[in-house]
Amino acid sequence: MSLAIQVVSAANLQNLETLGTSDPYVTIIFQGDKKKTEVKKGTLEPEWNESLQWDLPSKGPRPDECIDITVKDYERLGRNKLLGKATIALRNVVHAAPGTPLNYELGLLDASDSPTVGTLKLVVSYKPPGGSGAKGRPAVGGVGAVAVGATSAGRSANLTATDMGADAIPDVGVDGVGAVGVMPHLPQQQQQRNRDRLSNAKTKFQVRVRVVEGRQLLGANMNPVCRVSLDGHARQTRVHKGTNTPWFDQIFFFQVDKIPSELMEDFLEFKVCNSCGIRASTTIGAFKFEVGMVYDQAEHAVLNRWLVLANPDEPTPTVQGYLKVSVAVLGPGDLCPDMAARQSEQDDVEANLLWSAGVHLQPATFVLSVYCAQNLPRMDAGTMQTLKEILGVGKASKELVDPYLVASYAGKEVQTKILYTNENPEFRQNLHMGFLFPSMCNVIKITLMDWDRVGEDDTIGTATIPVSAISAPGEEGFLPTFGPAWVNVYGARREWELLESDGEGSMNEGREAGCAYRGRVLLALHTQVGSYPPAPTTSIDNTDFNKIRRFRGTRKFVVMCQLSGAWLLGAAGKPLELEVSVGNFGNKLENTMLPSPSSTHPANPVFDGCKYYFLPWSGVEPFVTIHCDFEDVTHRLHAVNHITSIITSTQHDLERLESLLRGNKEGGSKEVQEALLDACSRLTAACSESLPEVDPVRHTETSLDIHLKGHRQRELSALGKAAMSWHQSEPGQVVTELQAALNKLHNLAQEPQSGMPDVFLWLMSGTRRLAYIRIPAHSVLSGHTASSHGTLAGRFNTYALINPDDESGCCLGGVVRASVWLGREEESRTWWDARPHLQLTVYAETYENQVMSVPGSGKWTDSGLLMTRPKYSDADGRLSLPREAFPAPDSWAFQGDWFIDPDPSVRFEADAGRQLFTEEVFELNVRLPGGTWIPAPTPWTDVRGDPATERDKVELPRGWQWRDAWTYDLQRAVDGEGWEYTVESGLVGWSPQEKIYHVKRRRRWVRERHLVEKVEKKELVQVDGWEYAPLFRLQFHALERKIDMVRRRRWRRRLVPTQPGLPPTPRLSIKAGKGDDEITQLTCPRMYVVSAERYQYQLRAHIYQARDLPAGDKTGLSDPYAVVSFCNGTQQTEKQKKTLCPTWDQTLIFDDVELTGPLSDTAEQAPKIVIEVFDWDARGAPEFLGRVFCSPSLIDPGQGYQPLPLQWYPLSVASNQQGELLASFELLLKGGEELPILPPTRGDLYMVPFGVRPLLQRTRVEVLCWGVRNMTTFELQSVTRPSIEFECGGERITSPVMANLRLNPNFDKPHLVFDVELPKEELFMPPLTLRIVDHRAFGSKPVVATAVVTDLHKYTIEPKTTRESIGMTTLPRLDAKFTKDKGLLPHRPHLNQTQASREPGTVDSDIDWWAKFYVSCGQLERSGSYQSKGYEKLEVMKGCLEDEARFSGFRDLVDTVTLYRGRGDQAQEAGEFKGTFRVYPLLSDGAEDSQPPLILSGFPSPDPQEVVARVYVVLGEDLAPKDAGGASDPYVVIKLGKTSKSSKDDYRHNTLNPIFGHVFEVQGTLPLHKDLEVQVWDYDRFSSDDMIGHTSIDLENRFLTRHRATVGLPRLYHVSGSNMWRDAELPTEILNKTARQRNLDGPVWSSQPLSLSLGGTTYALTDFESVNASLPPTAGEARERLALHVLHRALALVPEHVETRPLTHPANPGIPQGRLKMWVDLFPVGPELPPPVDITPRQPHKYFLRVVVYNVFDAPLQETSVVSREKMSDVYVKGWLQGTNYVQKTDIHYRCMDGDANFNWRLLFPVEVIEAEQVMLVEYKEHPWSLTSTQLRRPPHLTLQLWDNDLISRDDYLSETTLDLCRLPKPAKNRDDVGPSQVPQMMAETDANSVAVTFLDDDTQSVNLFEAKRVYGYFPFIRVEEGVTQIAGKIEMELEVVSEEEAKLRPAGQGRDDPNMNPKLPEPDRPATSFLWITSPWKSFKHILWGRYKWYCITLVILFLLFLFLFLFFYSLPSATVDYMLGIY
């Protein structure tokens, strides 16, 4: 592959020489490779004819790349002068045929891009790699370029480049509703065929709709909700509060049974509304489209598409927002595609839009001006550049990056040209991105890329510009605009690496937050509305480029950082240092910037005595400064700080208010009201302040600055006015408003033009970056006012360093306490003025390096193989820094001579600072391969393998004591005896498994010792100050070892300023080398600050307990301990075994903590304490459970000591909260008054002092340990004999062992009581932990499940004495067997329908249960006269009974606690605990007799209870289809324990909305069979049945609840009929029992008037029933009615109900499979149970409809007689019942000339009718091969049509009438009375468009044929012509319905067939002309021809005879004449 350019010649070149003529030559640059022609001497018309060739790699050039050409005048002395330049785009070159030469004649441009007269001729050819052609090369979408030069100069080239316009955006809509076409990727014909393949018969479809999210909804303070409607059915999502970007993610199902063509034309409508509470919801926007549009797509679905919402009420709809949905239309046999909701950039493209045809989305263009970029990092290895230098070929480039920029928005991508080897490129291009305005995409993505010659292009970094931050909607809004401003680009570490990890790629591509600054780019953006871009890119001329120079002007800024400490560091093998940088300033690895004292000195991390390491700075705090140059954008950042200060204040008020509301549920306390008023007034005052002003001298405002300032000020003003009235609202509403205000403030605080990079603080080891923290620049920016001052500016803060290599997010890279300040350079004096206690110390520094000449010789030298550093160097060994070469910087002078200053970190011994230390020594064995292990020659070593002291000879240092004996370490990767094996320790690692080839093994012996007294130790550092290490890159130490081969020591010399005031930052210019090798190096000295105010503190960390920790072991428990780190120390608590709620009760004391700075600063900015909780494991490393940062409270004992109360702190793992810690932290000042006494001790440990720990009181905990349920297997064995251990506050109690879980899952003695010391305050209430232990064979007792009850306070009650406490808190004792009061037997209702017929008045036979159900559902038309007769309703619930809030899930007496097993996020449900708790304080005197009685003593019997469950399954709704035809054959299965009952033999055919009407009665034992399983299955004749869905009901909870959920109570007491009392107990019995259970006085009855007294309240019957009330005849006695009324009003018992239970399927969790309306009655097993309710579905009665058609009058005459030319029709009547295929016809009245036809014909129709519902039952088969029929309920509509018969062509339709047999309009008595009055739609104001007679409403006189039995009269035929309804005939007929029995008694034949009776129909009296002519030709002649054309016929016959005579005469005349002449006779 190659590119060849032949430079032919040039003409008309400029002569730039004063004397003589120019010497031109041509330079061509392609992909950064420069080539030149030879120089032509003294000519302006040079001819070169020279070929230049570029060998290209396997990766071909892109069409958007360019060739840069310059023509210069060669100068022997001085710079060569430019004669002209040009650019060629490769688009035409790469798309041409391979090897085809392209001729160019380019016009040359001068340096300012102005055309010259010169031209240049070139020939360009390109050879692609073998096998590829130009046509196969993909073009870069959206990128266009032209040959710059030829076009600019206005000259034509031989080959013209083609301009590329913007991508075409389809603008196709669906009429009226619209979408962007019907998916552009499918051909229209193919889409139409999808729909055409459907049959024209009714088909069942399912339409699934998933509403995913909304975006950019117009409006403020919105509560959006989405409503989806189809075919009159609507679904609604949840309401989302206070957002215009709601995330719905809800799925809906619509079941449709229609003709496909009708369904395809139905509209699916989406409407997004603003739910405004009590006010009506207002529509935000809507969208609707035809269902057929979805069906025509692939898989019959549209997935994750954006709908453009518009206001349907606007005459010209505008965009109101976007809604993301997925829709699937599933027919028979269709599979549903994956409709999972997702958030992907691939969906946020305009090709994914659907918009209505009436909505006009305007075309718009983003014009993104890309000016230049800066500070791009190295992206290439530079191998080829180094090779060029070695071989002397060309010149190596230092800038190893080839950048270009890619901008993307709404799926469109445009990119700039590539600028090769340029780290500061000037692009000078406008990128044009066309889109539809407004767009749903909210982010403009800016990506800097590096072109790669061979592989894929690399991402340098990514930045995003939120469109919502650079624009604003509304009348005062503005279009997106931006800049010119710098956009900072962040990504992975800036230093180049050969292999990029996945995490670094994610950072560079913007998927994760970047950890390093990687450059910035200067951009501007403006929006053009109304057109698409003509080209994707254009150039920026010099004039426009120069205009932005004022935005590039910089000012001097300085970053100052005072570092106070670094701790919580991990072990490191090299010294560590901290670096502060902003942009590239301060980056010590960036050699293009001036050095700054931006890093601390390298120091060895020192162990902190427990777990971590810290950096020892020995009281001298490092101080770093960075002087940088940036544009002055402080006016923008100050505005951000102003709004941030409001956010901080509001957040604080909100947290305080929420805390008060948690303690005061009612919200009416004075403290809450004051907090409300303070919060609202503070927010109002803050919003009324004006934003910081802009300094026109220093600041340069953009248009966006002006718009944002006005927008922010308006929004703040509106927010302040609204907040003034909030305090008058409810507290909960104020909290909601404050949260919404915070969201709005966060949006206002976005600053898209923040050109100043963030400040980075890096932890480094040499050149390796380990951990970082990224600090936003505005947060540390100094301001002139308190509101504009950054929240962290100049304040000490504890920063948690992030480890970029840690994917889990759990590991910290360390903790740094630092004070960072950013400000203008002239303001730096204010920083020092605010800190008069600080003194600056500056040192010049160099390291002297030496190596050992011969290993083991002890001779040190400064030369040798290991001497890889200069003799004197910096700490990293990169710079040569001889001591004598250090000059004094300007304004500084040296003070004193060089001195040795060893690093303080090497002075620490291994056990320095520790209270506990672990001695270790390794035992080493060797062997020959496969031999026996023997001690090694050096049997005892350290971890590095160096000889060590023998284990038993290790001496104990002074002041220490041993804690235990020597043991080998098993908490590592070792075998059971602690051995690890290897072949050679220096070459390969150690393995825990022994192999035959292993020749070495070792094991680690450890022994702990603890400090008992402090002993002064001698200085470890030698006088000469040397530090030793094996190699320079390893960690140095103070004492020389045998393996040390290098050493160094640090020399320092102090620098002092030579002039008063603040001197500039010193930079040292050092010359190194000699002669030609001499170089000048810049370095900076070390800077420190020393505070005059230094104080000693003591930290007391009171760690009391934790709760709800994640499980760390597989048993579901943990062995937790807490690690507390503060400054340079770390301590840990003791371990708590097997608990999730440990109580440590321990105080950790950090003594002699030295902090600098004033006390006031320390009180506000004290170092934070880091608490980490771990799970201890016997083997392996501890498992991390959570972490929290806490601030200590400074206490000065001299001002009085008040103990600090405990507080709950949330623990978190990564970003997830995992448990809480109860602790407090006191920072006590030492040196003044005596410190408070030390806390009491427990052994060697300090306890939490009594003033701090919660105030405890003796508390009784009662546990009703009822039992366990649904226990899963553990270790492949069932749980059979469990016991439960309850732990709370350190006290434990264990339940008895259950005998056998399978026989009785209840405990025999469930009542447990234990006393414990618990806090008085609920805030400190510890949780209660449950541990379920299974008792197995051989003494095995594994923990099989655990649970934690964190909200134990909800079981807390006030103790009461004697009888006062029994009723409110005592559980009822239920008898195991059913009892019955024999005295009440006569009152039991037992009447049935047969008895009712003999006892009139007791039963209303017209009323059934279904009437009650339908009237309760609001379907009055199906309920008959039920409501008018005064019967009561039942309650039809929208959900499950237990989900009703008033019943609390039936957990009022026996609660359900879910049990878990497993660790952390892997925990799984293991079962359920049934029981409850009562917690109450005991009296302080301690006497048992005076204590309150036990609360739970009256618990029910734990023995199994036999129960009978009656399950009433009413109907199913919207069941999921299971058959290929889109329906199901559902039936119900009931399972209780091992009992199963099914209605399979009575399944419902081919329906998704079956009416079951089944009653199942199953018997079971509670609690063994507590879960009632209700399943719905689909019956299949040939294959196995499929489960549609199931639901589960907990019968035990219903049986035990005090809400009495066994049998629902009706509203009225009936003794007979369908509403007859169905409970086993009468209302009075229920009232008496409930009153006893709830300890209510009464009931006390009174007879005059009838009343009763209950609990001090009197209820009279007249309070519920008026005196004149008309009661149903089945109502029972008044006493029972009153008792029932009181039960409903005074006691919250479960009413008579039907619950709606959703069905689910295990294969589709979370997706509803339909609903089931049902209820359950529960009875104890007894000798007699009340009869069940009859809910058998209403059965239809068989009738025969007899329609006798006598005559038809005024029939339309459709045809004209051919012979007679008269109007006529061959009339007949066709009739059928709608929904059936049984069509009957009368005979034909031929030749109806006057419109009157006589038939006397009987039509017979069998019909099955349910009179109560006024519907008929229709059965039909959907397909000929269907084995079962489908039942359909529909109104009985009779349709009669009048037709004209045609012999050859199709019959002609004349008119019709459709009659509702249940609401039949009264017929006319004679034909003349038939008129418009019988046709209601003809009487309406507008014309109807249906030929059917509109059925009359209730106010119109109508007849129910099934009641009247027979109707005779005249009815109209009607038809619609041109939209007008008119009468088109009249029919005289008789309608009669007879039952099946009556039809046998009074038979009648069809038509006039036998038996022709009832009535007998004579032959019709028709005129003689009524016949079919083809069957009666003689009649036709006689009646048609002869009567009218008789004389014509006679004349015709005579003429015919005459013609025949003449014909015969003339025929025979010649023969007769010849015979005559011949004489022949």
Image (tube, rainbow, N blue to C red):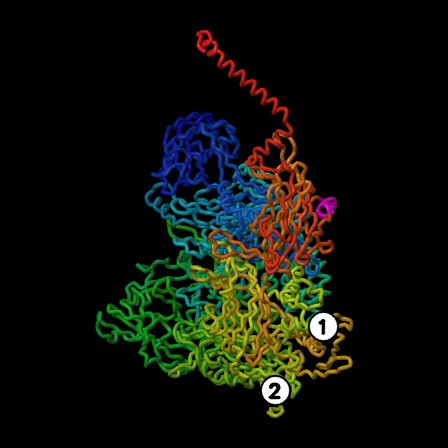
Q: Left of 971 or right of it: where is 345?
A: right
Q: Please tell me whether residue 918 is drawn above or below residue 1498 in the rendered image.
A: above
What is the span of residues highlighted in magenta in the rendered image? 1870-1886
Tell me, yes or no, whether the two marked residues, 2 and 1, touch with CB atoms within 8 Å. Answer: no
Between 658 and 1302, the one lying in front of the other is: 1302
Q: What residue type is labelled 2?
A: Leu
Residue 1885 lies in the magenta-colored region: yes
Asked whether, in this view, residue 1877 is left or right of residue 1584, the answer is: right
Residue at the disc numbered 1:
670
Q: Nearer the viewer, residue 1078 or 897?
A: 1078
Q: Residues within 10 Å of mark 1 (few under 14, many from 20)?
A: few
Of labels 2 and 1, earlier in sequence is: 1
Q: Quadrant of the N terminus?
A: top left
| Amino acid at pointer 1 | Lys
Quadrant housing residue 1684: bottom right
Q: Position of residue 530 (x, y in %)?
A: 61, 39
Q: Is residue 2013 left or right of residue 393?
A: right
**For the residue carrying disc 2, how many other residues have a C-alpha within 10 Å: few (<14), some (14-19), or many (20+)?**
many
Per the rendering, the mark at residue 1728 is none
Instruction: For residue 2015, say whether it is visible.
Output: yes
- Give the CA separation, mark 2 to mark 1: 31 Å
Classify 1745 as above or below 1588: above
Indicate whether residue 1029 is drawn in magenta: no
| In the displayed structure image, the side of residue 907 where residue 1481 appears, left or right | right
According to the picture, the residue beneath numbered tag 2 turns out to be 1482
- The secondary element bearing badge 2 is classed as loop
Image coordinates of residue 1446 in percent, x first then y, are 64, 71
**Residue name at image x 40 percent, y 53 percent:** 1072
| Circle 1 SS class | helix
- Asked whether residue 550 is in view, the answer is no
